[in-house]
Image: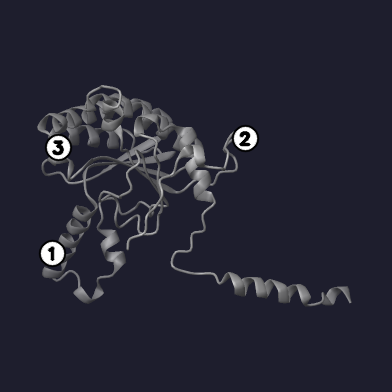
Amino acid sequence: MSKAYPAVNEKELTLATDSGTDFLVPPRHLAIVMDGNGRWANSRGLPRTEGHKAGEISLMEIIEGCVELGVEVLSVYAFSTENWRRSPKEVAFLMNYSRTVIRKRCAEMDALGVRVVWSGRRPKLWKSVIKELERAAEITRNNSKLILNFCMNYGGQAEIADAVQIIAQKVAEGKLRASHITPATIAKHLYQPQLPPVDLFIRTGGEQRTSNFLLWQASYAEFMFVDTPWPEFDRHVLQQCIAQFNGRERRFGTAIDQVEALETVAVEAEVPDQMAI
């Protein structure tokens, strides 16, 4: 039976952030599935596209919040390789709107010290969208406050498959021995190999799945599935998520025997301090 991960309701988080953010230790790499736009809009009697428009405000709010908190990398899931299955009308809107948002917000992100990079497949992606992504990457290339990894026409399985194809070609050309392929080899051939692994993975909107996002990079990430829809997700909710993230014990495959640890502490307490004798 698969484990059920409870959704995080921001009202139930007990770690307060009212005293400020100085005590928060930010994740190096934060990944967000910006979900719930359409449902948020439909619940208000609005078309799904209005939810995507409202999501733009949340995106800038979280970018500013990440800069404020000291997050190094923010990866956002803007459009997946599976999103082409949506209605042609919604796909066209998302392409047009993504292009407009990137162009419109580029100067603002540059002023914030944000460096834009993008991950995804070129085939099928509108050339005008690629043009704006590359333009934003060029304009912001020297910034260092935050790296915004804009994932457009992206899929985790596709990314791994693309990396494997490049590696296979190198093997076929005699540039690499198959016996020398390691996980590090695959990581080196991902879309943005210079980025650190994901530390905290947040999905808004109440759904509890990864939806093929950063499968390789998030192998040891902490996951949070929050009920808040993306248009309502702000830096205060982000701070609450990071506060909860700070309270988690990350072991990366190791384990601590709590009973053994307590016994060790007890034994050490019984040993006399030789310096005091």
Q: Amino acid at mark 2?
A: Ser
Q: Mark 1 and mark 2: span between their CA atoms? A: 55 Å
- Seen as rendered, the residue at the extreme front is 1
Tag 1 and tag 2, C-beta contact below 8 Å: no
Q: CA distance from mark 3 to mark 1?
A: 33 Å
In percent of width and height, residue 168 lies at 15, 66
Q: Residue at x 51, y 41 (%)?
A: 12
Residue 135 falls in image quadrant: top left
Mark with earlier residue (3, 1): 3
Where does residue 169 sit, x and y in percent of width and height? 13, 64
Mark 1: amino acid? Gln
Q: Mark 2 and mark 3 in contact (Cβ < 8 Å)? A: no
Location of the C terminus by quadrant is bottom right
Q: Which residue is mark 3?
A: 86
Residue 187: image tag: none
Q: Residues within 10 Å of mark 3 (few under 14, many from 20)?
A: few
62 sits left or right of 36 in the view: right
**Tag 1 residue:** 169
Q: 258 or 243, which is in the foreground?
A: 258
Q: Amino acid at mark 3?
A: Arg
Whichever of callouts 3 and 2 sits on the residue coming sooner in the sequence is 2
Examine the rendering and report whether any part of residue 37 can be seen: yes
In the rendered image of this protein, does residue 76 appear above or below residue 163? above
